[in-house]
Image (cartoon, grey):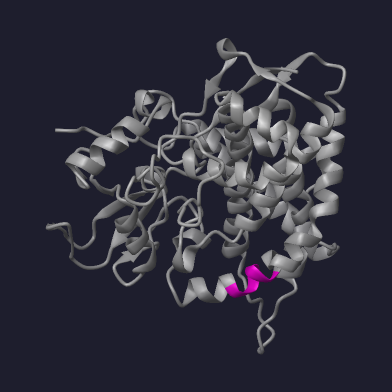
Amino acid sequence: MVEFSPYAYEFHEDPFPIYARLREEAPVYHNPEFAFWALSHHDDVLAAFKDVATFSNIHGVSIDPTARGPHARTGTSFLAMDPPEHTRFRSHVARSFTPRRVAALEPRIREIAAMRLDELKGRESFDFIADFAGKLPMDVISEMMGVPEPDRAELRSWADLMVHREEGMFDVPPEGAAAFAKIRAYFEEHLAELRREPGDDLLSSLLALESEDGEAVLDQDAMLSFCNLMITAGNETTTKLLGNMLYWLWRNPETKARVAGDPSLIPAWVEETLRYDNSTQALMRLTLRDVTIRGVTIPANQYVLLLVGSANRDPAAFPDPDVYDIDRDTSDLLSFGRGNHFCMGAALARLEGRVAFEEWWKRFSDYEIQPDGIARVHSVNVRGFAALPVKV
């Protein structure tokens, strides 16, 4: 019988054989040691995303014991809400992520990408993550939130600590908990400054929202949790997307030659990478009632991992799923979820991926990855590279 632990380093290195076995042998998998279930088929994951009456977000999206539950860490996370609270919060935040507003960010994102890549011109080699992919999304998110440039590197280092897990660590490590506290303290001060002197940024606009009785629409806890979400999810997942794009194109030389010669293929490259090896591999839900899937009943009050990475490799949804094919139809990918909690940052992540590599190919005609220096992030939710050395 297949055994699956989202904490295992071997799984982090290559989860896809395990996913294939789960789909075949245990599509409704139960791990009593870590007290979770897992769904691996595309149609089951999709149905769970849409069924908010059964699969709740109220305990968050991470399987880590101290990151889930009714009193997880501190504050009320946007990701740990169900309707109607989630609907109300999202209606306010979503105004900054409409297609029109995201499209309006393109010139500035292009300026930032060009600036960061110009810093690398003349160098024969560098770490793609540390020197570019880790900086661009943090710059973009920080500008949206009014975070000064000198503070961004430290914020990103704290976000990294929140994600990483040492081998054998089955919970948020002390360093991650401390980083969470530092991010929260930073934004407590930052929000106080914005209340005194509002700027032309997302946080200032949210702080200015008032209800009909004059009270703030979003309280302090909600604002701080949103800041944490933007710095971690909004930054880390796009950083990992950029690294995964570069890596898998390198592993497929014929496709690499096509993309290098035809920038119009970059959006398809983004989409296939999101399917083939997405930054977010799993999202947790809590069952509010008994539910029977494929003849197996999951009781109420159980934690369920929705294995997005497996769903995107399900041959029932994507023929030849283990082939990296930028010509395929990716319209059914689940990389940003579905339903009420569909990722508001999806359009922004896609835009950053496209713009980043349009600027990349203007400056570098070719590249090779140095395998000996590759290092992976080890996380129960996020998949990507901590270091990706390249030679250009």
Left or right relative to 348: residue 273: left
Left or right relative to 41: residue 66: right
Give the prevailing secondary structure in the magenta stretch.
helix
Tell me the residue at 45%/61% (across/down): 80
Left or right relative to 92: residue 48: left
Whether residue 379 is situated above or below residue 54 in the rendered picture: above
Number of callouts in the render? 0
Queried whether the magenta region covers residue 155, the answer comes back as: no
Whether residue 158 is situated above or below residue 234 in the rendered picture: above
Residue 184: x %, y % from top left: 61, 49
Residue 40: x %, y % from top left: 30, 47
Tell me the residue at 50%/52% (across/down): 329
Q: Outermost residue, top direction?
A: 372
Residue 315: x %, y % from top left: 34, 45
Residue 171: x %, y % from top left: 38, 36
Res. 302 in view? yes
Please identify the quadrant where the C terminus is shown: top right
272 or 99, which lies in front?
Answer: 272
- Range covered by the magenta-colored residues: 91-95
Whether residue 82 is situated above or below residue 215 in the rendered picture: above
